[in-house]
Amino acid sequence: NGQLLVKQKGMNWYNGANVTRCSDYSLRSTKDGIVQWRGSYKHKEVYVVPWEYVRLNCVWKNCNTLAPKVYEPWMGDKFNYGKRHMLFGMYQEWKQSDAGQEHAAKKVEKVDIQKVIMKKIRAYKKQKQREGVTQTREPREKVAANDSDSEKEA
């Protein structure tokens, strides 16, 4: 039984990583660590980042702000000069490294492959458009309202 994080009626906050929900909808942490809150109006989430992960992968930027030790591509490449300025410097170094060059080459290759695929798709669509619409079933026979069998018998 971990630390009580939220006592609530109904599901206002949802349980994220390292958080469990009790039968009375209260949320408790399953590990010791930093509690983080995220989400918007209809889906707010509480999760706990374990201290082991923080000590292994993070560095304290100042007394209350954590930053990563190394840059990774999923962190993005668009930075403002406020909170993420530290990441911008890490990104510039990573971009010049072998891993960054390899990642950029892989992305360019992926874009080229996608262009070839889209070219094939467009050619196929154009060919089908020129052939005209093919009928997949027999057209229905037109039946007038007064041609029904019950009216013929009467």
Image (tube, helix red, strand yellow):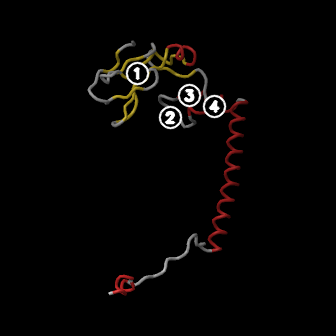
Comes first in the chain, label 2 or label 1: 1
Judging from the image, what secondary structure is the residue with disc 3 in? helix
Tag 2 secondary structure: loop
Looking at the rendered structure, the kind of residue marked 1 is Thr
Classed neighbour count for the residue bearing mark 2: other residues with Cα under 10 Å, few (<14), some (14–19), many (≥20): few
In the image, is residue 89 above or below residue 146? above
Q: x, y percentage for residue 91?
A: 61, 30
Q: Residue at x 46, y 24 (%)?
A: 17
Mark 3 sits on what residue?
Answer: 87
Q: Amino acid at mark 2?
A: Asn
Query: How far apart, in angstroms, are the residues tagged by discs 3 and 4?
Result: 9 Å
Q: Is residue 12 left or right of residue 49?
A: left
State the separation of the CA atoms marked 3 and 2.
10 Å
Q: Which residue is outermost to the front?
A: 153
Quarter of the image that includes the N terminus: top left
Percent position (x, y) of residue 56? 57, 15
Amino acid on which disc 3 is placed: Leu
Residue highlighted by disc 1: 20
Q: Pick the quarter of the image with the C terminus.
A: bottom left
User: Label 3, label 1: how many angstroms apart (C-alpha)?
Assistant: 32 Å
Expressed as whole percent of the image width and height from the top left, the position of residue 116 reads: 70, 54
Residue at x 40%, y 21% (from the top left corner): 20
For numbered disc 1, what is the local secondary structure?
strand
Query: On the picture, is 1 further left or further right than 91?
Result: left
Query: Which residue position holds label 2?
Result: 80
Check disc 4 and give the amino acid type: Gln
* Nearest to N terminus: mark 3 or mark 1: 1
Name the residue beneath numbered marker 4: 92
- The residues tagged by marks 2 and 1 sit, at their Cα atoms, a distance apart of 36 Å
